[in-house]
Image (cartoon, rainbow, N blue to C red):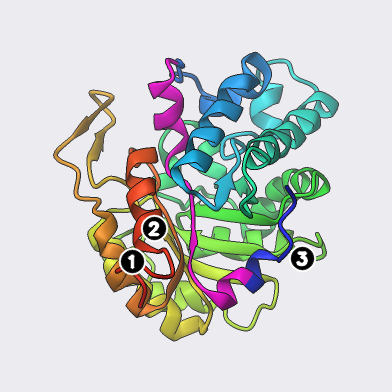
C-alpha cells in the first residue's frame, strides 16, 4: 500500500524502523554477490531475490525499505554493456521491487531509494575513504542523472547514504535540488569524524536549514561510533536523526572476510531515542532477527520508547 502519511510526518509523530542489510539477507537466500555491481546485479539477473529480501524485512517489522540501487549507476551498468535506457529501467525496478514488498502488509511501509557514494561504483573500497580527486561539480554531475531516474520512479524518500566526506555531501545536496523528493543524509564515519577525516559538526551543518532534508545521521559504522554521533546530529541540525550502523564486525578486505564479534544490540535504541534518533535500523550484517527486536522495542507501549 502507498503510505497515507509522508515519512516526514511519521517522524514528527514518533519512531520509524528501517530495515537491515540487504546484501546479508540476499546471501542468506543463497545469492552470490562477489561482483562489481554487488546486489545491483540481481536487478537484471534475479529480481525476485531482491523482492524476497525486502519482504523478509517487512515481516520482521521494518517500516522503511531501502532499495537495491546503492551500487547501481549508469557508469557501472555501462561497463556490463547495459545502455542508458535499460539502466534507467533497472534503477526504476529497484523502487518497484521495494514497493511490491511493501504491499505485502497493511502497515505503512515507505520506500527509500538508495543513492550510494561515487566510490561504490568504483567497487574498490574507496567509498570508505572518500577524497576521490573529483571536484564538487564533477561529483554533482555524476550523481544527478541517477537521482533523476530514481526520483522519477516515485520513492517516498531518497537515502543519500554512506557518504564518506563533505565534498560528496555538498554534491549530493546540490544534485537533489528540484527533484521533488525529500531526502535523508547519512554519513559513514569512524570515531568522531567522516571517513575522510572531517569534523562531524561541520559535516552535519551542511544539511541544517535545508527543508528537503528530513533527517540527518550516520550509517555503515560501528554501533559505538553511532552512539556518539546521534546526539551531535540532533544538536547541530535540529532535525530527526537517522541511524543504522553495521553489526560491529570488521571487514578484512585482504582476506575478504568479516573479523571480530558483533556489537550491534537493538537495546541501544533507548540511548539513540533519548539523543534524538527517530529513524533507526541496521546496515551491513544486521538481519531480520535484529530488526524484529528493534521493532518490538520501539512499539508505542514498549520499553524502547523515550
Q: Which residue is mark 1?
A: 193
In percent of the image, x 52 and y 53: which residue is there?
161
Magenta span includes 302: no
Q: Which residue is mark 3?
A: 177
Q: Is residue 107 left or right of residue 271?
A: right
Compared with 15, 146 (above or below) is above
Q: Where, by quadrant of the figure, is residue 212 drawn?
A: bottom right
Tell me where residue 124 appears, x and y as whole percent: 43, 32
Residue 98 disc label: none
Crowding at dot 1, Cα within 10 Å, few <14 / some 14-19 / many 20+, comes out as many
In the image, the segment drawn in magenta is 10-30
- Choose between 22 and 213: the one closer to the eye: 22
Q: Is residue 287 visible?
A: no
Alpha carbon separation for disc pair 1 and 2: 8 Å
Name the quadrant of the C terminus: bottom left
In percent of the image, x 60 and y 29: which residue is there?
51
Residue most extreme to the left: 260
Q: Which residue is mark 2?
A: 196
Tell me where residue 36 appears, x and y as whole percent: 51, 23
Magenta span includes 27: yes
In percent of the image, x 48 and y 74: which residue is there?
204
Amino acid at each position: 500500500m502507498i503510505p497515507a502519511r509522508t515519512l516526514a510526518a511519521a517522524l514528527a509523530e514518533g519512531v520509524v524502523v528501517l530495515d537491515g542489510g540487504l546484501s546479508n539477507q540476499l546471501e542468506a537466500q543463497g545469492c552470490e554477490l562477489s561482483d562489481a555491481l554487488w546486489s545491483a546485479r540481481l536487478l537484471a539477473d534475479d529480481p525476485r531475490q531482491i523482492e524476497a529480501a525486502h519482504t523478509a524485512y517487512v515481516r520482521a517489522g521494518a517500516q522503511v525499505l531501502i532499495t537495491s540501487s546503492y551500487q547501481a549507476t549508469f557508469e557501472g551498468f555501462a561497463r556490463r554493456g547495459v545502455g542508458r535506457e535499460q539502466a534507467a529501467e533497472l534503477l526504476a525496478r529497484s523502487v518497484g521491487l521495494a514497493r511490491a514488498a511493501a504491499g505485502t502488509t497493511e502497515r505503512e511501509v515507505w520506500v527509500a531509494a538508495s543513492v550510494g557514494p561515487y566510490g561504490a561504483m568504483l567497487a574498490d573500497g574507496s567509498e570508505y575513504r572518500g577524497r576521490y580527486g573529483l571536484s564538487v561539480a564533477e561529483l554533482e554531475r555524476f550523481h544527478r542523472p541517477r537521482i533523476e531516474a530514481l526520483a522519477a520512479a516515485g520513492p517516498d524518500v531518497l537515502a543519500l547514504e554512506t557518504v564518506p566526506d563533505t565534498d560528496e555531501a555538498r554534491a549530493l545536496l546540490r544534485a537533489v535540488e528540484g527533484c521533488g523528493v525529500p531526502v535523508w543524509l547519512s554519513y559513514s564515519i569512524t570515531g568522531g569524524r567522516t571517513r575522510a577525516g572531517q569534523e562531524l559538526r561541520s559535516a552535519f551543518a551542511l544539511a541544517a536549514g535545508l527543508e528537503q532534508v528530513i533527517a540527518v545521521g550516520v550509517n555503515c559504522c560501528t554501533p559505538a561510533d553511532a552512539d556518539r554521533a546521534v546526539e551531535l546530529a540532533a544538536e547541530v541540525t535540529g532535525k530527526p536523526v537517522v541511524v543504522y550502523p553495521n553489526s560491529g564486525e570488521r571487514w578484512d578486505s585482504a582476506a575478504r572476510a568479516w573479523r571480530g564479534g558483533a556489537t550491534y544490540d537493538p537495546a541501544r535504541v533507548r540511548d539513540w531515542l533519548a539523543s534524538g534518533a527517530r529513524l533507526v535500523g541496521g546496515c551491513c550484517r544486521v538481519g531480520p532477527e535484529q530488526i524484529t527486536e528493534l521493532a518490538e522495542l520501539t512499539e508505542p507501549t514498549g520499553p524502547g520508547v523515550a
